[in-house]
Image: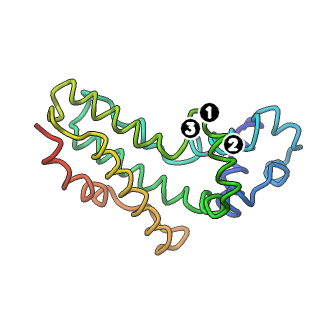
Amino acid sequence: MSARERILDAAADVMRERGVAGATTKEIAKAAGYSEALLYKHFRDKEQLMLSVLKERMPAFAARAVPGEATVEANLVAVVHGGLAFYRRAFPMMASMAAQPVLLAATRTSLRQYGAGPHEPVRALTRYLDAERDLGRVAAGADTAAAAALLMGACFQQGFLHYFAAAPDAPDLPESAAADLVRPLLPALLP
């Protein structure tokens, strides 16, 4: 395993345990068995490291739907299922940061430099639905941005509730939970 991979694994563990706000690069480097200087050879700053953890060590969901492949319903269920798992696992990492206004503002500014932030999953899902509309697989009058916001908001809320109620080693919510969230929106989306 490469040094970068070990650093990412250690960062994911430390950030889940202590939150992003409580995790230091020094602590992450130590957990990986490396110096902080080596960590900075692979990651420009803590925000880039956090983004890499979110992209590479968390369940993916925004990029699962490919326009024209599978059905719109199947693609949405896959995205939502991944979103439920992502938000459940991301919540303990992000809660400490969100609770500190100064840190949240600094993180918000830093993430903008990377073109990242919590709005990106909604934008990605909107782009997917827009592409499906261009293919005629989503109704011409469908409000794709509202549908994307509703689905991602439901993922966030249900992911948090599962994190709050379940044991840390409990399995992720089943695909049927994702299907239950998608089903009510289908009449407004499908032609």
User: Which one is earlier in the sequence, the residue at label 2 or at label 1?
Assistant: 2
In terms of depth relative to the viewer, which is nearer, 92 or 148? Answer: 148
Picture coordinates of residue 24, whole percent (x, y): 79, 53
Q: In the visual, does 35 lie left or right of 98?
A: right
Q: Which residue appears at 24% of the width and 27% of the height? A: 68
> Label 1's element?
loop
Q: In which quadrant of the rendered view does residue 103 lie?
A: bottom right
Relative depth, front residue between 145 and 29: 145
Q: In x, y percent, where is residue 72?
A: 22, 38
Q: Is label 3 in contact with label 1 (beta carbons under 8 Å)?
A: yes
What mark, if any, has residue 47 been given in the picture?
2
Residue underneath mark 3: 116
On screen, residue 183 versus residue 163, left or right, reads left
In the orientation shown, which residue stands out farthest toward the left?
A: 191
Task: Say if 6 sits above or below 44 in the image.
Answer: below
Residue type at mark 1?
A: Tyr
Name the residue tied to disc 1: 114
- Disc 2 marks a residue whose amino acid type is Glu
Structural crowding at the residue carrying mark 2, measured as other residues with C-alpha within 10 Å and reported as few (<14), some (14–19) or many (≥20): some
